[in-house]
Amino acid sequence: MARVKAAIIGSGNIGTDLMMKMIKYPQNMELAAVVGIDPDSEGLAMARQHGIATTHEGIEGLKKLPCYAEIGIAFDATSAYAHKVHDEALRADGIQVVDLTPAAIGPFTVPPVNMSQHLDQPNVNMVTCGGQATIPMVAAVARVSDKVHYAEIVASVSSRSAGPGTRANIDEFTRTTARAIEVVGGAAKGKAIIILNPAEPPMIMRDTVFTLSEGGSEDEIRRSVADMVAEVQKYVPGYRLKQEVQFERYGDNNKLKIPGMGEFTGVKSMIMLEVEGAGDYLPSYSGNLDIMTAAAKATGELLAERRMKQGGTAQ
């Protein structure tokens, strides 16, 4: 089977989990290189054990590897600051980039919602873990409604699965996710809240999605949500509804007041989700990290399919 060669930049938890997914569940990509900056990192050691080329010299080290000329797709799991440098270098060499950092140089991308629109983009951004988990649900409501006036998501994750990067960028997380709820999910106004739960044993990621929409029936919303859950489960098997979608109607006699926006009529939907990780490298309670790496892999597979159809960089 023809495959597009790929590289992972970043040998930390995210990069290593993505690496294990690509090794365990190979599709149309061949992982050719893993890049880090710590020669003793566990991620680089595991890559070497699997016969994958490695370098601890960052992007410059990647360029020196013999396989570099054959790479068509690169996944960046470093930082927003580093990504800007990486993107410029990779783009100059015709390599498509899947960005798992908050840099958001390329368009926000959620595979089952809008990936088909971005197959030719040189860089696509994976939003946030909360965005990957909840935006499909907002989009599911939007596609059967005349308008989604407002969407609010609450992502609750184990504090154990929130590293220093997440903790230092909570405000950026909420702003980025809220913007993507609007741009990708289709809501007129979006809001995001993240909760770090210190409970022991660690809890699985839980998400609650609230939408206020007009023009769609409860049955249509219920079916659309179920269909979208099935789409996400194709690449995140642990993604599931915790209970049936809950509805509340607001009419002219009991309008819903949203602070800063006004009063509205319509249907309020409450969608409760659970995201359990596959346990490929990270523990199963780290569903918030798992959905990012799974979505990135799914995105890479769609990019690879496109490249092979165009006859580019397939080995």
Image (cartoon, rainbow, N blue to C red):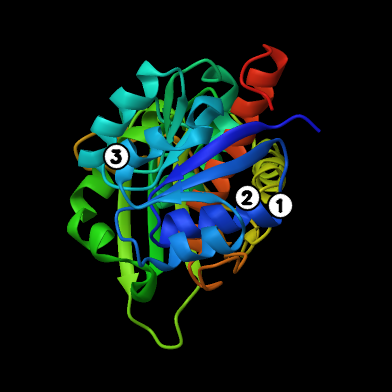
Alpha carbon separation for disc pair 3 and 1: 30 Å
Kindly tell me whether residue 312 is visible in this rendering: yes
Eyeballing the image, is 174 above or below 167? above
Residue ID for mark 2:
22
Q: Nearer the viewer, residue 249 or 18?
A: 18
> Which circle marks residue 273 in the picture?
none
Question: In the image, 314: left or right of 197?
Answer: right
Alpha carbon separation for disc pair 2 and 1: 5 Å
The mark nearer the N terminus, 3 or 1, is 1
Tell me which residue sits at (45%, 38%) in the image.
Answer: 65
Quadrant location, the N terminus: top right
Q: How many marks?
A: 3
The mark nearer the N terminus, 2 or 3, is 2
- For the residue labelled by badge 2, is the local secondary structure a helix, a strand or a loop? helix
Residue 51 appears in which quarter of the rendering?
Answer: bottom right
* In this rendering, the label closer to the viewer, 2 or 3: 2
* In this rendering, the label closer to the viewer, 3 or 1: 1
Residue ID for mark 3:
176
Q: Nearer the viewer, residue 44 or 274?
A: 44
Question: In the image, 93: left or right of 24?
Answer: left
Residue ID for mark 1:
25
Alpha carbon separation for disc pair 2 and 3: 27 Å
Eyeballing the image, is 222 above or below 68? below
Residue 160 appears in which quarter of the rendering?
Answer: bottom left
